[in-house]
Image: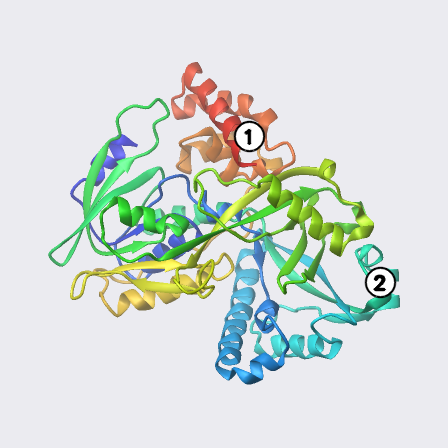
Amino acid sequence: MAQRLAGLAGQVFDVVVIGGGINGASAAREAALAGYSVLLVERGDYGSGSTSRSSRLLHCGLRYLAPGGPMSAFLLRPKRLAQALRTVRRSMRTRAELVGELGGRLRPVTMQLPIYSDGPYRPWQLDAAFTLLKGLGEGGVPLDYRRLPAAQALEELPFAPFLRDRDRLLSVAVYTEYQFDWPERLAVDLALELQRLGAAAFNYTAVTDFTAEGEGWRVTLADESATGGGGRARADVRCRALLNFAGPWIDEVNDAAEARVRRTVDVTKGAHVVVRLPEAFRGQGLMAMTSDGHPFYCFPWRDAHFFGPTETAYDGDRDRVRASDGDIEQLLGLAGRELPGLFVERRHILYSWAGLRPLTHDPGTFMGLRNRTLHDLGPVGGPPFLALTNGSLGAHRSTGRDVLAALGRRLAPSGPPRRGGGLAKTGPLAAELGPSEWLRIARDEQVVHLGDLLWARSGKVWDVGHGSALARSLAALVGSTLGWEQERQDREVELYLDEVRNLL
């Protein structure tokens, strides 16, 4: 890594993107395809922040048609309805695009949404909402919507017999959603495609300072790959435009650089717990509306299910986020309320995880605004400096295109457009990897630590055992390829096991 940073010293790029999560990598890819020279840097591994800790859902847009109160709220606020319809159209367009292109990276889930006599919405409203979704959809990816009366649902649907208040159950809406299978792998693939396009992408590389100089920026990079506490190699590069896509760490990056820009982020935490349900629930999910009007999910995950997410304001250590006892009790309480027949208790939890959501800071709004915002933070008349808040996993493609459009209004690319090769439709599932494939990944996919193999490269960390039993033999297998002596192998194993203990 030190040699690679030394090779970067003095280079000039059109664009430097800070943050290698799904949105930063997508924006960098769009810029590279358009002909910009691009450098993408990520302080950790690609996709290791919010991308890897989300609920992993590709929403069809149904939630945007719920105004958070009676449906008449849309009639009283027509601008809000217009915004909701635009968002739904974008969601359905993105859904069709990603399902068509990513194939096995997305898994279909049969969702069930119970409708109660005392609930916030009537059966006809769900029918109307799905008719609207179908009308706004593009690409022919079906929603498979149907609505079963209560008696039929109790006979045919796995969740229905375990629901609360079955005497007030009117019907159950059934439809298809999609789920990303370990989206951090997608962030890795976007970074690797960047390199194939002739751009530069570096993980374990932090931005420690940036300063406007003339018509561009001077950016100081630091090597974050060392495990032994040695000094960090540094290099300065220059760019014509700077994009801060560091998610929950946007303000920290700006503060460290003394950028003197306004606060952009309010951070919330979302926690999840994983349990194993009976075989009949495989591939089946549940969406319920809580008493405060927020959606609550039970979603299939590998050979188990997760409940979540919570959403609470967060001001703790952003590098060590985990589900607290309070989060777990809240999720168990919600599961007990919505699915009392399952009798889910703490002893049933296989593991938990939590992630951070970078909402848009607003002094008058508790926990921030939920609209995706592209901030222009650059000095007046100075070089472009953009930052993104509340970017979502499902909308990363459209976010990348929107960022490119904003960039194009400020800066022309220095080169001609490039043609991308596209991403593979299926990633390497950990259960199928043999020694030769592990070695190829270690050699070709910017692996710095053992955890890179077990998290983003294979998703093995999300299995019930988190790949812990594999850690030592895998470190020995790839050790010669990565230049690890026995001491380094042992240290990598301990680092990985410590990471699992602290984050899951």
For the point 57% across and 31% down, the residue is 434
Which mark sits nearer the N-terminus, 2 or 1? Answer: 2
Q: Is residue 301 visible?
A: no
Tell me the quarter of the image containing the C terminus: top right
Q: Nearer the viewer, residue 257 or 480?
A: 257
Q: Position of residue 423 (x, y in %)?
A: 47, 53
Q: Dot 2 surroundings within 10 Å: few (below 14), some, or many (20 or more)?
A: some
Q: Secondary structure at mark 1?
A: helix
- Residue 155 occupies which quadrant of the picture? bottom right
Q: Dot 1 surroundings within 10 Å: few (below 14), some, or many (20 or more)?
A: few
Q: Residue furthest left?
A: 214
In the displayed structure image, the side of residue 178 where residue 81 appears, left or right: left
- Amino acid carrying mark 2 in the image: Arg
The residue pinned by badge 2 equals: 166
Q: Position of residue 393 (x, y in %)?
A: 50, 56
For the point 62% across and 62% down, the residue is 294
With respect to residue 449, does 64 lie above or below?
below
With respect to residue 210, does 477 lie above or below?
above
Q: Which mark is residue 359?
A: none
For the point 41% across and 36% down, the residue is 444
Q: How is the image coloured?
A: rainbow
For the point 40% across and 46% down, the residue is 192
With respect to residue 230, does 199 lie above or below?
below
Q: Secondary structure at mark 2?
A: helix
Q: Nearer the viewer, residue 412 or 364?
A: 364
Tell me the quarter of the image containing the N terminus: top left
Q: Nearer the viewer, residue 115 or 367?
A: 367
Q: Which mark is residue 501?
A: 1
- Amino acid carrying mark 1 in the image: Arg
Q: Is residue 271 visible?
A: yes
Q: Position of residue 413 (x, y in %)?
A: 23, 62
